[in-house]
Image (spheres, rainbow, N blue to C red):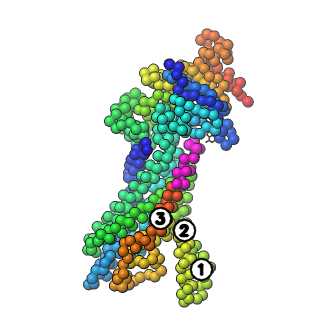
């Protein structure tokens, strides 16, 4: 981790028809870190990610990704960020190869290196043997892994993963998290990870942010939050305790 | 434009491998072939023993066999082709979650809609060109006349007009696929618009005309003319009518785009009718307002889709 700021927001606000989804959010993402983005359902995590990508206009405030405004320079920003969506969609008629080829073409990756990158990505997520099957026949976990492969062929600096373990079995969940950790170490990718699996987040994330009803109520390394909130100095805390404490306090 | 090639390529592959396209193509090809075959046979018997008039080749497109002429057929069913290609273009991507995936790739948002429209236009062009080519070949075989250069020009212009016309309908269905979340709703809305323009406008026009001009004095020429004028003005609101007018480019003997009188075979081939054909330029001059209007409404329709799509919230599912 170099400590360089890749993403920065200030007073970022999104109001959907009078309901505030994200409320004056200010935070930053450092190069090389895995940032855990936590919060109950409807807290505004996905909305925040979409604003960082420039897919949704903020109502107020600003975002800077690598020093750029995502709504002014959408291409430059989106070519640096890989996005694993919450409700991932695939073209069911294509097979894994074709899907990755299409993504590679959209990213302007030249044909000669695309094949190689696709193969590498498929191998990394363990889908190489099933790559000829149409995506319609894929199981939930296979789709999720294909989503990761799409992210890998972009060779991006930043990855947004919105609940990457949704619907995965315990073993696949663990392997998914290992994969994320490995990516981070090997390619120095910066990861913004939204998840509800607190023990895994605690294991792989350098810092966490807890969002409750649109507000970021806590942000920092888990041990720091534990010290501040629970008054525990040794290792006898879990992220779950910290999270629940904030959650209870944030209740209306 | 980044990525437009990728999207066009994928859309084309989707269109050409989809059953709905194949079925529609088979249907249109079959009907046109049968129509032209019958027209050709009729022409052949009518032409027996007399000198072949000029431009007889173009009659393949304009004269009706037992039911309708090819031009009428395209005017009526061409819209269906455009509608079928576009009614689920955007809302299917939305409901399957692939739209936000596309948009998280480094492409501009308008590339998605431009690519889809372009792929649709290419598909339409391929289909119409194929049909016109087959008809030309069939005509050569049955009637045994070789079309001249001017005739080929007229056919080419007619082909372009048809492509613009069907693309307009593609634009309509694309717009509905953006406006409506549900695929069934957008399909229904597109059908409703088609039925409205194809049936209700002509019907409404004659109702209005009848109410304006009393029907009792049918022998009164000025009343008849006035009635025809009212009907003509109202039906111009219909793209179908615009197309029918524009398509008269294919008939060099038409001095106006209006056809008030129906012709029998004797009149159709009578020498006087062929005595003063218009030059290509003159014909073009007559139909150009209609062509321009057709292009304009197609562009406006696509423009509205474009603006709506660019402003839409990605997440509003
Ligand atoms: N298109 C929309 N129109 C109106 N309100 C919306 C829209 N999209 C999201 N919201 C609201 O914004 C709030 C934040 O939603 P968001 O999806 O960001 O939550 P989340 O933190 O990702 O939740 P989860 O953990 O369930 O994925 C919710 O209250 C939701 O109802
Ligand atoms: Mg979410």
User: Looking at the image, is A69 positioned above or below residue A177?
Assistant: below
Q: How far apart are marks 2 and 1 (CA)?
A: 18 Å
Residue A84, position in %: x, y? 50, 33
Helix, strand or loop at label 3? It is helix
Q: Nearer the viewer, residue A120 or B234?
A: B234
Q: Mark 2 points at which residue?
A: B237
**Segment tinted magenta in the rendering:** B303-317
Q: Mark 1 points at which residue?
A: B210
Confirm if mark 1 falls within 8 A of ligand 1: no
Q: Residue, x 34% and y 85% (percent of image)?
A: B271
Res. A171 in view: no
Task: Tell me the mark number nearer the camera, choosing from 2 and 1.
Answer: 2
Residue B309, position in %: x, y? 54, 48
Q: Upstream in the sequence, badge 2 or badge 1?
A: 1
User: Looking at the image, is B13 positioned above or below residue A146?
Assistant: below
Magenta-colored segment: predominant secondary structure? helix
Q: Mark 3 points at which residue?
A: B292
């Amino acid at each position: 981790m170099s400590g360089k700021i890749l993403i920065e927001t200030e007073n970022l606000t999104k109001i959907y028809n009078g309901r505030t989804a994200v409320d004056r959010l200010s935070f930053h993402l450092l190069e090389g870190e895995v940032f855990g983005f936590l919060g109950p359902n409807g807290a505004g995590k996905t909305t925040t990610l979409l604003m960082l990508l420039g897919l949704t206009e903020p109502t107020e405030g600003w975002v800077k990704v690598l020093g750029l405004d995502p709504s002014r320079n959408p291409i430059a920003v989106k070519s640096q960020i890989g996005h694993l969506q919450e409700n991932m969609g695939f073209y069911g008629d294509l097979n894994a190869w074709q899907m990755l080829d299409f993504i590679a073409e959209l990213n302007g990756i030249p044909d000669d290196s695309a094949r190689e990158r696709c193969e590498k990505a498929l191998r990394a997520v363990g889908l190489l043997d099933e790559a000829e099957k149409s995506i319609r026949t894929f199981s939930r976990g296979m789709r999720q892994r294909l989503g990761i492969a799409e992210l890998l062929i972009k060779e991006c600096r930043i990855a947004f993963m919105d609940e990457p373990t949704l619907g995965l079995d315990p073993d696949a969940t663990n392997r998914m998290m290992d994969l994320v950790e490995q990516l981070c170490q090997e390619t120095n990718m910066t990861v913004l990870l939204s998840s509800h699996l607190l023990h895994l987040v605690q294991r792989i994330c350098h810092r966490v942010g807890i969002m409750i009803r649109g507000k970021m109520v806590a942000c920092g390394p888990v041990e720091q939050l534990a010290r501040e909130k629970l008054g525990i100095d040794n290792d006898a805390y879990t992220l779950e305790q910290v999270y629940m404490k904030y959650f209870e306090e944030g209740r209306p | 434009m980044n990525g437009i090639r990728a999207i066009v390529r994928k859309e084309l592959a989707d269109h050409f491998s989809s059953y709905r396209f194949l079925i529609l193509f088979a249907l249109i090809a079959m009907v046109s072939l049968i129509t032209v075959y019958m027209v050709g046979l009729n022409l052949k018997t009518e032409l027996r023993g007399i000198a072949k008039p000029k431009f007889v080749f173009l009659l393949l497109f304009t004269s009706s066999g037992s039911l309708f002429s090819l031009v009428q057929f395209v005017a009526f069913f061409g819209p269906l082709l455009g509608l079928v290609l576009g009614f689920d273009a955007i809302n299917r991507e939305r409901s399957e979650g692939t739209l936000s995936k596309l948009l998280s790739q480094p492409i501009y948002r308008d590339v998605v809609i431009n690519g889809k429209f372009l792929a649709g236009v290419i598909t339409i062009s391929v289909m119409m060109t194929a049909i016109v080519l087959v008809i030309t070949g069939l005509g050569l075989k049955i009637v045994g006349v070789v079309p001249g250069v001017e005739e080929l020009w007229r056919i080419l212009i007619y082909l372009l007009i048809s492509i613009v016309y069907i693309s307009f309908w593609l634009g309509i269905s694309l717009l509905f696929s953006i406006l409506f979340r549900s695929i069934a709703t957008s399909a229904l809305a597109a059908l409703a618009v088609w039925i409205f323009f194809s049936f209700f406008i002509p019907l409404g026009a004659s109702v209005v005309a009848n109410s304006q001009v009393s029907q009792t004095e049918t022998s009164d020429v000025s009343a008849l003319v006035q009635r025809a004028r009212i009907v003509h003005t109202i039906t111009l609101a219909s793209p179908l009518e615009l197309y029918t007018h524009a398509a008269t480019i294919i008939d060099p003997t038409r001095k106006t785009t209006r056809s008030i009188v129906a012709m029998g075979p004797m009149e159709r081939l009578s020498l006087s009718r062929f005595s003063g054909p218009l030059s290509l330029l003159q014909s073009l001059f007559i139909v150009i307002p209609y062509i321009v209007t057709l292009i304009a409404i197609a562009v406006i329709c696509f423009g509205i889709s474009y603006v709506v799509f660019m402003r839409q919230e990605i997440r509003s599912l």
